[in-house]
Image (cartoon, grey):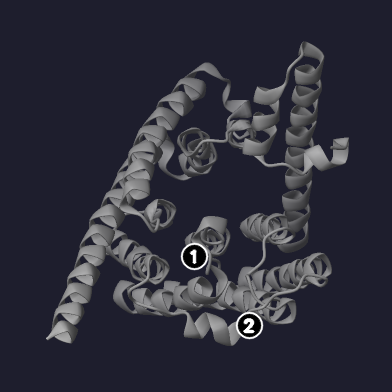
Amino acid sequence: MTFYQELQLNQAGSKNLLKKSETVKEKSYHILVYLVKIAATMAFCFLFVTIFSILFGNENSIVGVVVLLCLMVFRNADLGIHTGQSTMLLALFFVIMTVCPHLANQLSPVLGMLLNIAALAVLILFGCHNPFMFNQSTLVLGYLLLYGYDVTGKSYQMRLTGMALGAALTCFVFYRNHKNRTYKRNLNDLVQEFDISSSRTKWQLCQIICVPAVLCIAELCNMPRAMWAGIAAMSAILPFMEDMQYRVRKRIVGNIAGVICFTVLYFLLPSSIYTYIGILGGIGVGLSAKYGWQAVFNTFGALAIATESYGLKGAVGLRVIQNVFGVVFALIFCSMFYWLMSKKKETVVTVAAK
């Protein structure tokens, strides 16, 4: 494996190489490559988002984050169907992420929930056909970030331009990287494979219904940063209950640990470098292969931003409450949904047997 090829590995792949190292020299080499990868990734991400902020305004820096996320994921990940159709779907996804979150913010929480359900249905049914590729962590996360950091007026016009540029970049990179691959399935196959009795479809429906419901309830309760609860729910919803229970535990513990670590840093560090705590969190995420540790370091960036608006006490309280509510609601919702679907299947089988 070349230096460049090793740079393309994810955290788990890099750490697997470290574990398999037989000599100190070999291990040192893999550590060097890993650190170079983290440094290069952080530098590129910072530069990319900074450029978007300069071009489209600081209030649209989140557009740079969403576009960057899509570029980094879809240069390797696919949608499992014909490349041309996948490229058109990606363009549609950008339209949805640009328009629907903004419109939903103009509506009442209940009507906004209905619009969010419709929007997520398209993103998840056609973009997240394989749950274990975690495309929902890109598409749904991007949708929720744009929902949570909505803008109006001139800023929204700039957002339209930024998202159009992002769509063009993502579609170009995606098509270039996947055009020579052969796929046996097309868009029609995704529609035909929709099956309410399958684990995949039940997981998709839970994402589609539960995440907007969490947002709606949080907003009806006048909780700021409702998107945090939605992101937590999205992250916890998996096809199998055992995996969900594991994620719920890790999310809660990880966020509490992240809050404690952030608070300690907040009091130890001078106020002039508070904004860099978020960057420290990004480095931590890059070094983390396990979900629990990622939850810890993801908290840093969120709190670094929220503290400016709500103060330390308010931001910490919101972070814990929103995350606990999001994952617990998702676990209860999915448990009930899967149970109802299993009962319905048993009823159908019983009727058919008669």
Residue topped by disc 1: 147
Residue shown at the point (18%, 73%) measured from the top left: 346
Q: Which residue is tagged 2?
A: 186
Amino acid at circle 1: Tyr
Q: Is residue 106 left or right of residue 41?
A: left
x%, y% of residue 164? 72, 74
In front: label 1 or label 2:
2
Are the two marked residues, 1 and 2, in contact with CB atoms closer than 8 angstroms?
A: no
Q: Residues within 10 Å of mark 2 (few under 14, many from 20)?
A: some
Q: Above or below — where is 36 with respect to 194?
A: above
Residue in view at x 77 percent, y 14 percent? 23
Left or right: 140 with respect to 244?
Answer: right
- Tag 2 or tag 1, which sits nearer the N-term? 1
Outermost residue, top side: 24
Residue 102 shows up from this direction: no
Name the quadrant of the C terminus: bottom left
Residue 35 location, x and y as percent? Answer: 75, 28
Measuring from the top left, give residue 321's x and y in whole percent.
30, 44
